[in-house]
Amino acid sequence: MFNEDLPLPSSGASPVVTQPVFSWWGLLGMLLVFLIILLVSLWIIRRLSKMSNRRITAPWARVLDRQVLSGQQSLYLVEIAGQLQVLGGTDHHLVKISEIHDPHIASEILEEITSRPTERMEGWIQSVQKLWRRPSQQKEEPFSIELERLLEEVEK
């Protein structure tokens, strides 16, 4: 019934082959929309983290250093009312591990903290945060000045 030698019937129109058109304006528009969504998301995250991140504003308590032990466990070096204390903490629990009474050991620890180089990524993040952050009304002392004050107190 079907003869392979006979040509197939043609509709008379040749098929139209279309190629996708690349538009630089479309790409730039899509990139602009992506950046706007990204900036709005970062702004929302920043606002939400301000609500949940309550910093210690008391002049008698300061976190001087933090060392991460594992994912949720950290050691904190804290000055509370002029005394250096080592605290162990997780997301749900905080324990006083020890108190540093020896002025020589305290000065060595504080000296090591001040001479520690800032990690590159941490420095980059802090510079971006300075650009993002609004200038505050109250002027805070730089960390190095505060550590020098603590070193002087320990040496007394």
Image (spheres, grey):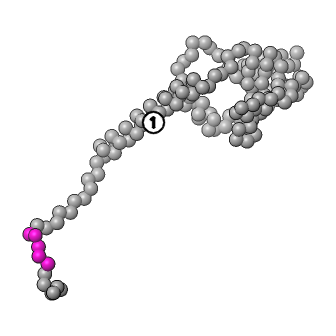
Tell me if residue 152 can be seen: no
Residue nearest the viewer, comparing 11 with 82: 11
Q: Which residue is mark 1?
A: 38
- Is residue 10 one of those drawn in magenta? yes
Tell me if residue 51 can be seen: yes
To which quarter of the image does residue 126 belong? top right
The residue segment tinted magenta is: 8-12
Considering every residue shown, the one lying at the far left of the view is 12
Residue nearest the viewer, comparing 155 with 28: 28
Task: Name the residue at 13% across, 67% down.
Answer: 14
Disc 1 element: helix
Considering every residue shown, the one lying at the far top of the view is 138
Q: Amino acid at mark 1?
A: Leu
Query: Taking 23 as reference, is 71 left or right?
Result: right
| Mark 1, other Cα within 10 Å: few <14 / some 14–19 / many ≥20 | few
Query: Taking 89 as reference, is 34 left or right?
Result: left
Query: Taking 135 as reference, is 72 left or right?
Result: right
Q: Position of residue 92 (x, y in %)?
A: 71, 32
Q: Is residue 90 above or below residue 150?
A: below
Task: Name the residue at 54% across, 23% down.
Answer: 133
Residue nearest the viewer, comparing 5 with 103: 5
Which corner quadrant holds the C terminus? top right
Dominant SS in magenta: loop
Q: Position of residue 48 (x, y in %)?
A: 54, 27
Task: Name the residue at 40% across, 34% down.
Answer: 36
Q: Position of residue 112 (x, y in %)?
A: 79, 31
- Is residue 9 one of those drawn in magenta? yes
Which corner quadrant holds the N terminus? bottom left
